[in-house]
Amino acid sequence: MDRTRAGPTRTMLAGAALGTAFSFGKLMMVIAGSSAILGAYVSMMGFVGARTG
């Protein structure tokens, strides 16, 4: 794969597809929910890391 040329990544394309799949209100709820899940996961990993050293 040629990485010298800038262009949209697969992640960017997936985000664009997700953005058009929902209405604005639903998209905000999806983003808030997924952020809460990610935050809880990272918090648990931080807690485990702090306890285990």
Image (cartoon, rainbow, N blue to C red):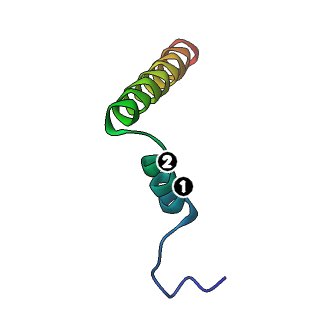
Instruction: Locate residue 5 relative to residue 23 in the image: left or right.
Output: right
Reading the image, the residue beneath label 2 is 18
Q: Specify whether 37 is left or right of 31.
A: right
Q: Nearer the viewer, residue 11 or 49?
A: 11
Q: At label 2, which amino acid type do we have?
A: Leu
Q: How many marks?
A: 2
Q: Amino acid at mark 1?
A: Ala
Q: Quadrant of the C terminus?
A: top right
Considering every residue shown, the one lying at the far right of the view is 1
| 1 up-or-down from 35: above or below | below
Q: Give yes or no for contact between labels 1 and 2 (Cβ–Cβ under 8 Å).
A: yes
- Counting from the top left corner in percent of width and height, residue 27 is at 39, 36
Taking the spot 32% from the left edge, 39% from the top edge, the residue there is 24
Q: Which mark is residue 49?
A: none
As drawn, the residue found furthest toward the front would be 23
Could you tell me which residue is drawn at 44 percent across and 40 percent down? 22
Q: Quadrant of the N terminus?
A: bottom right
| Residue corresponding to mark 1 | 14
Location of residue 28 by image quarter: top left
Residue 20 percent coordinates (x, y): 44, 51
* Residue 2 versus residue 36 in the image, above or below: below
Q: Nearer the viewer, residue 27 or 37?
A: 27
Q: Position of residue 42 (x, y in %)?
A: 48, 25
Instruction: Tell me the crowding category of disc 2: few under 14, some 14 to 19, or many 20 or more residues within 10 angstroms, Cα based.
Output: few
Marks 1 and 2, how far apart at CA: 6 Å
